[in-house]
């Protein structure tokens, strides 16, 4: 059960994700008193591997596996797909989840991480290749 924790740029919010259950939880955290208050849990419907925080917008970028069984039971004729999800306004009452990249595995297999940089989306994978996309 792998878990990942991230801290926001303003150092006041922590986000945790659990690989197994396909959702993440966010907490407001005061480092002075070590007090944390639960904010939200967001189910995204994909197996999220790594979370990157966009330091300009605060958006979360997630490299995801839409069908994790294909990753475990690898078959080159039916490869594991790739998804990149973007979450805007994660700390609001209505965060917005968008699919920024999706593929059945024939272009890119098993995405694990995604990050926005200089107008591009960089996507890394578990064992395949990396992909650089121009964002519109």
Image (spheres, rainbow, N blue to C red):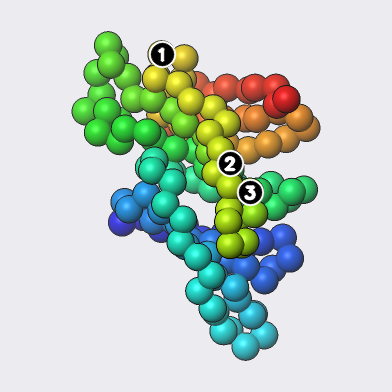
Q: Which residue is mark 3?
A: 88
Left or right of residue 44, residue 59 in this image: right
Q: Residue furthest bottom?
A: 33
Left or right of residue 22, residue 24 in this image: right
| Between discs 1 and 3, the one toward the N terminus | 3
Q: Could you give the CA–CA distance between mark 1 and mark 3, rounded to whole angstroms? A: 28 Å
Label 3: which secondary element: strand
Left or right of residue 32, residue 101 in this image: left
Q: Which residue is mark 1?
A: 106
Quarter location, residue 79: top left
The answer to whether residue 133 is visible is yes
Mark 1 or 3: the one toward you: 3
The answer to whether residue 128 is visible is no
Badge 3 vs badge 2, beta-carbon distance below 8 Å: yes
Dot 1, how many residues are within 10 Å of its Cα: few (below 14), some (14-19), or many (20+)? few
Picture coordinates of residue 121, whole percent (x, y): 65, 30
- Residue at 50% in and 74% down: 38
Dot 2, how many residues are within 10 Å of its Cα: few (below 14), some (14-19), or many (20+)? many
Q: How many marks?
A: 3
Label 1: which secondary element: loop
- Residue at 58% in and 53% down: 95
- Residue at 77% in and 48% down: 56
In this rendering, the answer to whether 106 lies above or below 134 is above
Q: Which residue is mark 2?
A: 86
Label 2: which secondary element: strand
Picture coordinates of residue 114, whole percent (x, y): 57, 36
Residues 115 and 87: in front is 87
Q: Quadrant of the N terminus?
A: bottom left
């Amino acid at each position: 059960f792998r878990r990942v924790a991230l801290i926001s740029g303003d150092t006041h919010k922590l986000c945790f994700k659990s690989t197994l259950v396909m959702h993440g939880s966010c907490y407001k955290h005061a480092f002075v008193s070590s007090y944390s208050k639960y904010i939200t849990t967001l189910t995204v419907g994909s197996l999220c591997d790594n979370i990157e925080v966009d330091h300009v917008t605060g958006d979360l970028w997630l490299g995801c596996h839409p069908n994790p069984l294909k990753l475990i039971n690898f078959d080159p004729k039916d490869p594991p797909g790739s998804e990149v999800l973007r979450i805007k306004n994660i700390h609001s009452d209505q965060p917005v989840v968008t699919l920024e990249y999706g593929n059945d595995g024939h272009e890119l297999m098993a995405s694990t991480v995604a990050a926005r940089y200089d107008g591009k989306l960089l996507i890394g994978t578990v064992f395949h290749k990396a992909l650089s996309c121009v964002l519109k």
